[in-house]
Image: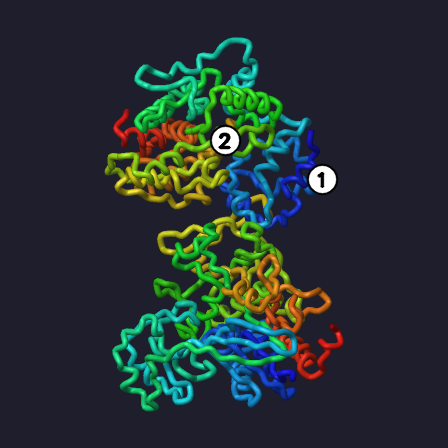
Amino acid sequence: MEKISDIINRTKAFYCVDCGKCTSACPLSRFGDYSPDGLVERALLGLPVQPDLRIWSCLTCNRCKEVCTYGVEYPEFIRGIRSLEEKEKGVCAHGELYSLMKLFTFTHEREQKRLNWVSEDLKVSNKGDILYFTGCLPYFDIVFRDLGVDTVEIARSTVKILNKLGISPVVMNNEVCCGHDLFWNGDLETFKKLAAINIQNIKDTGAKKVIFSCPEGYRTFKLDYPEFFDFDFEVVHISEFLSEKIEEGKIELRKIDEKVTYHDSCRLGRHLGVYDAPRRVISEIAKEFVEMESNRENSLCCGTSGWTNCDGFSEEIRKERLKECTDAGAKIMVTSCPKCLIHFKCHMSNRKGEYDIEIVPFEVLVARAMGVV
Amino acid sequence: MKDRAVLVIGGGVAGMQAAFDLAEAGIKVCLVERTLSIGGRMAQLDKTFPTNDCAICILAPKMMDCYRHENIEVLTLSEVTAIEGEIGSFKVKIRRKPRFVDEAKCNGCGDCARVCPMGILNKFDMDLRVRSGAYIPFMQAVPLIYALDRDKCMRCGLCEAVCGKDAIRYDQKPEIVERNVSAIIVAIGFDPLDPSGLTEYGYGRYDNVITALEFERLICAAGPTGGHVIRKDGKEVKRIAWIQCVGARDTRDNRPYCCSVCCMHATKEAILTKEHYPEAATFVLYTDLRCFGKGFQEYVNRAEDDYEVKYIRGKPGEIREKENKNLEIFYSPSSDRVEKLEVDMVVLSTALIPSEGVEALAEILGTELDKYKFFKLKDSYNPTETTRAGIFVAGYCQAPRDIPECIAHGSATASRAMEVVLGGSYDRRA
């Protein structure tokens, strides 16, 4: 178990000069009582950072790390602090989901019904080179239906896109939660158990390439699993996969008239640096693609990550982001992350008639343009 | 036979000082300058800190002293392409780019510039002014010999028609000249960083976010706006903020070093702004104010007390442009809250980085660079010696330093080169 001094060393927190750049870029500090470098300075001075509920407020959106000129790995610092043994539990917006994630580790208990969403019109396989790691969409779908969110649509669209390209992806009934949320909330042990299950199950299918639609899962497989486990299958996000296919001239897409903008999710954007691929694909579809005021590495967050605190400040961030979309004149905001989708839709569903924007998942936009849904 | 001559690469303030000291000691110097005029970066400045002396007024006599010195041969538009030999007897190949003007005949009258129909952004003015296709980079350029920009020239023939000295040479070709020298001094200075990659500040995207060197041209009476600090929309500034350490002290792009001059540079620019516009509000947003030199702290105190320059500790994390093209700066003065500052112009004190082409030159010279591409010293107790015997380094291209330090460093290299030329100390050391 790490000590706080280990975390300070590992994340180079001691380089912090308290210049306030991270705080002034942080989406949360803009609206709430929060300061990344303030917290780091407390830790450096030996003041207790635990219990401090503010550590659960951090969105781990990487904005601070992106602008820090001293190389402080602030999101990793927060994750470390959240993993400390002596800790105050954070306020969780969706506590029941955590229990679900933990239940996944008990694989022997009961076989899941993970593939209920796979309808007869979808071609999938049990073994093969290309695997689609669906993520938790099917599980979460029922929780967020009342917000008008259809996350299963994302999974179905992804498979339809792949089918159209002549691929019947492997989908696994024994896929479990990737552990992203537990990892970022400091539950390393459960995270590792989930990771081991997923990696073994994927190896069993013989898959060489794993495609993701969920940026959180993609980040976790790409950056975090390799820290603990060895595997040699390739991981790729659907946007990167499709962008390559477009370059090869293998996809035909119908154009749409509405002005479209793209919301960079923190995991796919700042965490993984995937900015161009989704834009490449969307630009093929939208006759008019516009950028919001903050975009790419400077993108505003959707306001919550890892199902931690969702509060009035998160709502302010969403409001600001949707305002940017409106100001850009876009009618459609494409998201790559199902959680961004849920958060924006939740915000909008409580403010009926305030926004003239449609939030469309990336995969759904592409599937529509390919004429497969 | 030893060659009693020294090659100086770079005609900035450090290189000129080295050349002048050597020449005064009776040693022949070949001063090679890449651009049209000697003078270097200092020539672009309006004033110097911490005395607010007019930069070109100090520099121009030095430029003339150098150019007119019987022992100094100034080769402008020239670059070193190869060297052979070793300490005591280097053979240097220098490529002289054509000026398309006969240097011996041109008297600098400027008739060609007046008739040339071309309009080209002037690099010396940080692209803020349009110059003619026949040009000198600035009024006090040394040598005062015009050049034709043949890349974009239409070859209309007007310049040739009006030149009373018959000095236009459209078909001039580059030539290679050779010089034999005992020692070489490298003083190629720095380039300002292009901050458009630091997207949080919107340089290149927002109209009124400019760099400190651009500001220097604006505030200069001989500059593109005649000393008026005006925005792209023509409005004069009323509220202006400097942001320090832009791209400097930044690990993201391997530039963790302090550029050494920007705290004073920004202070100077803020003071000059107040002198031009006493009603203007000026802000300097800094990380640490590094006032380490003689008179520096007093300079900052004076800026605060006499000129009401407001210093704010806090490095901004974002700038947003408003509809009226004003800028909203987000900063956090004490790490517990975010504040907004609205200004009508933002000046970025950008990092100063080793000059373009430094790697190619280092390869030609056979000298090593450090991890930031400054010239590496043989050891830290020989602050002028590169990793190759007989090749010395002066000024900013060795490490960040200000003008007086560059001059001192130039003199120091001159004295070390003198040892080689006059004393033959390298023989004893070997």
Quadrant for residue A358, please give it.
Answer: top left
The amino acid pointed to by label 2 is: Ser
Q: Nearer the viewer, mark 1 or mark 2?
A: 2
Location of mark 1 (residue): A46
Residue located 34% across and 84% down the image: B168
Q: Which residue matches tag 2?
A: A305
**Which of the 4 image quadrants contains residue B4?**
bottom right
Residue A211 at x, y percent in the picture: 43, 29
Closer to the camera in the image, B61 or B65: B65
The location of residue B369, given as percent across then percent down, is: 60, 62
- Secondary structure found at label 2: loop
Relative vertical location of residue A91 with respect to residue B411 in this rendering, above or below: above
The subunit carrying tag 2 is A
User: Quadrant location of residue B187?
Assistant: bottom right
Residue B10 can be seen, yes or no: yes
Q: What whole-number distance in Å separates the C-alpha atoms at marks 1 and 2? A: 28 Å
Q: Position of residue A216 (x, y in %)?
A: 48, 30
Position of the C terminus of chain A by quadrant:
top left
Q: Secondary structure at mark 1?
A: loop
- Labels in figure, total: 2
Picture quarter with the N terminus of chain A: top right
User: From the viewer's perspective, is residue B307 above or below residue A263?
Assistant: below
> For this rendering, which residue is in front, A121 or A165?
A165
Crowding at mark 2 (Cα within 10 Å: few <14, some 14-19, many 20+): many
Sequence-wise, the earlier of marks 1 and 2 is: 1
- Give the residue type at disc 1: Gly
Using residue B235 as the reference point, say whether residue B397 is left or right of it. Answer: right
Which residue does the image show at 57% across and 63% down from the upper left? B262
* Crowd around label 1: few <14 · some 14–19 · many ≥20 (10 Å): few
Question: Which mark is drawn over residue B222?
Answer: none
Residue B308 visible? The answer is: no
Q: Which chain does the numbered disc 1 sit on?
A: A
